[in-house]
Image (spheres, grey):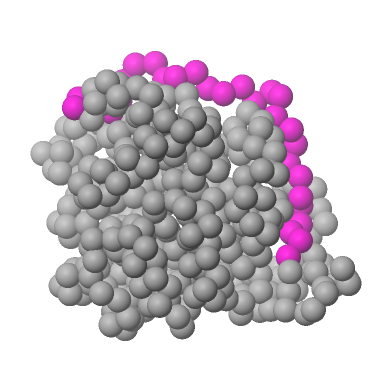
């Protein structure tokens, strides 16, 4: 897989230390969101649908570095929003690299060429460029004609200056396996690794019609991996995931998510319980770990988690499984992911609790005030389950925004 030996050794040693110390729950990757503001309006995004008072907020450099130190994870992912909009993103990355943490700076690449001078090539830094498949699928996903060409040009410019570049790809329903395989061939030509994952059905996402359920996800990835085995190019696909996670995507592993493996720090605090769900915030990392009811979340436990197979919930599970079953992990890496035969049993959903928190409690820049933003509605009643990109602003105007004193 396309992960450096340095990173494999350091992260592997970290996981081993946690196991030897008997720690059941520990962070693997810090998800650091310094802002929610973005310069795109992707139809599957549930991160940027906030009023300007929230979108204009930023974490400071010191707040970011304090979060890195407090969490202690060996890897830091910086998503958003669009991190390159942050005026101090160069200083944030420099401070994390100085701590010898592996930094994945996620970007849609629209500003990447313009901002490259803010960074220096390092074995601890790589850009993770958002690229959702071949041109047809990517431009549709990001709602921008020509977005694919801009991303590819930025990738080439960054590589030419000595930076390590990977791409992150989110897969939605209606994305043919053949097109995904073609996309993976193209990334091989670009010389980049690939992080690939099914999209999570954000409650706030504009389009609710194109998220995959678990069965469709497994069938789709089996087809993709089968095409890779049958193709002369498939063996060159640089997938940056563990073999166990890929095996999970193909339905061969019955994993439960480990949301504490990728804790999230954003402008509201430490998000409970995970990067994808915001159902409360803690003031410190220790408070997050000690006060979150972890057993209340996950597939089979909570309705919002029913179809999730995203890497931010399961990659840490796969890492733990590799340490517990090294021979099985080696076999999968050697022979490839199984694409035929029975799948692992599905997790029973009959006892999951219903979705809660139909609107978000969020802090705004008004001393002593909290704003409740959202539609006080029952789950699934959102305008027939779909909003257009043009309707995003209209939706915001229809929401209830209530401020009150703490």
Q: Is residue 99 magenta?
A: no
The residue located at (44%, 19%) in the rendering is: 344
Picture residue at 53% right of the left edge, 62% below the top: 67
Indicate yes or no whether the magenta region holds residue 356: yes
253 up-or-down from 80: above or below = above
Question: Residue at the spot x=76%, y=57% of the render?
Answer: 359
Where is residue 348? Give x, y as percent.
61, 22
The picture quadrant where one finds residue 50 is bottom right
The answer to whether residue 198 is seen in the rendering is no
**Front residue of 185 and 197:** 197
Q: Which residue appears farthest toward the front when viewing the image? A: 21
Q: Position of residue 109 (x, y in %)?
A: 35, 71
In front: 219, or 187? 187
Point 61% across, 77% down: residue: 57
Q: Position of residue 361 (x, y in %)?
A: 76, 61
Residue at the right extreme? 405
Q: Quadrant of the N terminus?
A: top left
Q: Residue furthest left?
A: 232
Q: Is residue 223 above or below residue 90?
A: above
Classify the position of the C terminus by image quarter.
Answer: bottom right
Which portion, as a residue range, is magenta? 334-362
């Amino acid at each position: 897989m396309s992960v450096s030996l340095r990173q494999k050794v350091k992260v592997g040693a970290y996981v081993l230390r946690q196991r030897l110390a008997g720690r059941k729950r520990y962070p693997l990757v810090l998800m650091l969101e310094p802002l929610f503001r973005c310069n795109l309006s992707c139809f599957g995004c549930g991160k940027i649908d906030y009023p300007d008072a929230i979108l204009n907020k930023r974490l400071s450099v010191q707040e970011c570095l304090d979060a890195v130190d407090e969490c202690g994870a060996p890897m830091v992912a910086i998503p958003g929003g669009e991190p390159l909009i942050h005026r101090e993103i160069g200083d944030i990355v420099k401070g994390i690299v100085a701590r010898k943490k592996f930094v994945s700076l996620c970007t849609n690449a629209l500003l990447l060429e313009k901002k490259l001078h803010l960074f220096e090539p390092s074995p601890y830094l790589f850009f993770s460029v958002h690229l959702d498949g071949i041109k047809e699928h990517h431009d549709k996903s990001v709602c921008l004609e020509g977005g694919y060409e801009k991303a590819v040009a930025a990738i080439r410019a960054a590589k030419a200056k000595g930076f390590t570049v990977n791409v992150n790809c989110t897969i939605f329903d209606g994305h043919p396996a053949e097109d995904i395989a073609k996309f993976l061939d193209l990334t091989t030509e670009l010389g980049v690794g690939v992080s690939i994952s099914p999209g999570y059905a954000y409650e706030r996402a504009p389009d609710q019609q194109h998220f995959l359920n678990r069965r469709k996800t497994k069938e789709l990835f089996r087809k993709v991996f089968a095409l890779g085995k049958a193709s002369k190019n498939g063996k060159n696909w640089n997938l940056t995931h563990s073999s166990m996670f890929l095996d999970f995507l193909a339905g061969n592993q019955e994993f439960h998510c480990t949301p504490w493996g990728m804790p999230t720090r954003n402008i509201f605090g430490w998000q409970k319980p995970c990067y994808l769900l915001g159902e409360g915030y803690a003031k410190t990392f220790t408070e997050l770990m000690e006060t979150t009811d972890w057993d209340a979340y996950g597939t089979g436990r909570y309705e919002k988690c029913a179809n999730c197979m995203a890497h931010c919930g399961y990659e840490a599970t796969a890492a733990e499984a590799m340490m517990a079953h090294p021979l099985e992990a080696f076999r999968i890496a050697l022979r490839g992911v199984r694409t035929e035969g029975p799948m692992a049993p599905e997790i029973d959903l009959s006892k999951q609790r219903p979705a809660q928190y139909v609107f978000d409690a969020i802090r705004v820049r008004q001393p002593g005030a909290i704003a409740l933003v959202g539609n006080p509605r029952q789950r699934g009643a959102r305008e027939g389950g779909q909003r257009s990109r043009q309707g995003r602003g209209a939706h915001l105007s229809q929401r209830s925004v209530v401020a009150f004193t703490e």
